[in-house]
Each structure stands twice: as structure tokens, then as C-alpha cells.
Image (cartoon, rainbow, N blue to C red):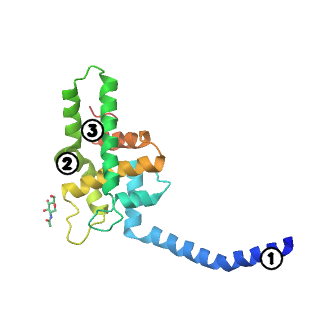
């Protein structure tokens, strides 16, 4: 009986192997050659973070106008990651900071028109994010949504928010040439 089992198993394995290999090879080919995949590779290098699940970054760089699988919910998590990172750092530096001052700092960093768009443009997200033909990929709401979604995607990929907060500081602080921007 064991040999029958083994034979059956071998036959099944061999029968399924060509399909599996065919799928893996073509999938790899698509991933490594499309401009979008190349852009995702570059973006990971810019972020200094390599995704275990690249589909999360793929989703983060997909606007709701492009497909039902998009970055909307990830950008909510990302916005929260950013607010948490900013609040944590502000209170770590000054435990006596007023709620008014803290809210001002959070508002400033979350403003679509200023810091968010700047950070997103520096990463060139307007050239990466996938949108429908009618959507302007440079629109602040589009690039900011994608920018925030990156940190939601990292949090899910790393299964914690600290890694995402660190990447945020690296990216946000980069414009000043310092690690911590305040
Ligand atoms: C797209 O949005 C950017 C940023 O708001 C703007 O400067 C540009 O003119 C827009 N392009 C088109 C074709 O509307």
C-alpha cells in the first residue's frame, strides 16, 4: 500500500509540476519586466524598506479610480501611523507640550497642500501611482493618498506600526538632510 500511495503522489506531483513551473515563470517574467514593477523596485530602494509581500506596495500605489483593489483603506491606516509617529516624537521630546501645539504639529504634517504633497513628489509617486485615464495622478489628493498608503502597507507587511513610523521619518526628514525634522 505505501508504494501505491507513493506512486500516486509522484504521478500527481509530476502532473502538476509543468503547470506550476509555467505559472511561476510567466509570473516572474511579468513582475520583473513591467514598468510598474520596476517602479515598485525603485520605490522600495528609496524607502529603504523591502516588502515581504510586494502586493501590499502594489495596492498602495493603486488609486480608487484604477481598480476596486485600491489604496483607500491603507491610506487611513497610513495617516494614523504618521499621526502616531509625530505625536510620539513630540511628547518624547517635550512631555509638557500643550494639546494645542501638538494638534498644530499634526495638522501641519497632515496638510495635503504642504508636507504631504512635497514628500510624495520627492518620491516621484505621481509617476508611479496607477490611476484611471481620466484622473490626474499629480493631484494632491491622489499623491497624498498614495504616500499615506505606503505607511499603511509597511505596517501590515511588518505586522507593526514602528517600522512604518521609522520609514516615515527617514522619508520626511530626508528633505532637511536630517533624521528628525523638528
Ligand atoms: C494635474 O494636477 C497638477 C497638480 O494639481 C496640476 O499642476 C496640473 O496642471 C494638472 N494637470 C492637468 C492635465 O489637469
Task: Bin the neighbour count of mark 2 within 10 Å (Cα to Cα): few under 14, some 14-19, many 20 and up.
Answer: some
Tag in front: 3 or 2:
2
Residue that carries the numbered disc 2 in the rendered image = 112
Q: Earlier in the sequence, mark 3 or mark 2?
A: 2
Residue 68, how many percent across, how many down?
33, 66
One can see residue 174 in this view: no
Task: Determine the CA span between mark 1 and mark 3.
Answer: 65 Å
Residue that carries the numbered disc 1 in the rendered image = 7
The CB of the residue at mark 3 lies under 8 Å from ligand 1: no
One can see residue 125 in this view: yes
**Tag 2 secondary structure:** helix
Task: Determine the CA span between mark 3 and mark 2.
Answer: 19 Å
Tag in front: 1 or 2:
1
Q: Residue at x 31, y 26 (%)?
A: 91
Contact between marks 3 and 2 (CB within 8 A): the answer is: no
**Tag 1 secondary structure:** helix
Residue 76, how many percent across, how many down?
31, 49
**Tag 3 secondary structure:** loop
Residue that carries the numbered disc 3 in the rendered image = 176
Position of 14 compared to 182: left or right?
right
Rendered image: mark on residue 46 = none
Nearer to me, 173 or 86: 86
Residue 8 occupies which quadrant of the picture? bottom right
Amino acid at each position: 500500500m505505501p508504494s501505491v500511495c507513493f506512486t500516486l503522489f509522484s504521478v500527481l506531483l509530476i502532473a502538476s509540476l509543468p503547470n506550476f513551473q509555467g505559472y511561476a515563470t510567466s509570473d516572474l517574467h511579468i513582475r520583473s519586466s513591467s514598468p510598474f514593477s520596476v517602479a515598485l523596485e525603485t520605490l522600495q530602494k528609496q524607502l529603504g524598506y523591502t516588502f515581504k509581500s510586494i502586493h501590499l506596495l502594489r495596492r498602495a500605489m493603486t488609486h480608487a479610480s484604477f481598480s476596486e483593489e485600491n489604496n483607500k483603506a491603507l491610506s487611513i491606516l497610513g495617516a494614523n501611523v504618521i499621526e502616531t509617529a509625530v505625536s510620539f516624537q513630540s511628547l518624547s521630546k517635550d512631555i509638557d507640550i500643550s494639546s494645542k501645539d501638538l494638534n498644530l504639529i499634526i495638522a501641519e504634517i497632515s496638510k495635503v497642500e504642504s508636507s504631504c504633497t512635497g514628500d510624495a513628489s520627492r518620491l516621484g509617486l505621481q509617476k508611479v501611482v496607477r490611476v484611471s485615464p481620466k484622473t490626474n495622478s499629480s493631484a494632491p489628493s491622489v499623491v497624498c493618498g498614495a504616500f499615506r498608503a505606503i505607511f499603511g502597507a509597511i505596517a501590515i507587511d511588518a505586522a507593526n506600526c514602528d517600522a512604518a513610523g521609522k520609514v516615515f521619518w527617514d522619508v520626511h526628514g530626508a528633505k532637511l538632510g536630517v533624521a528628525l525634522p523638528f
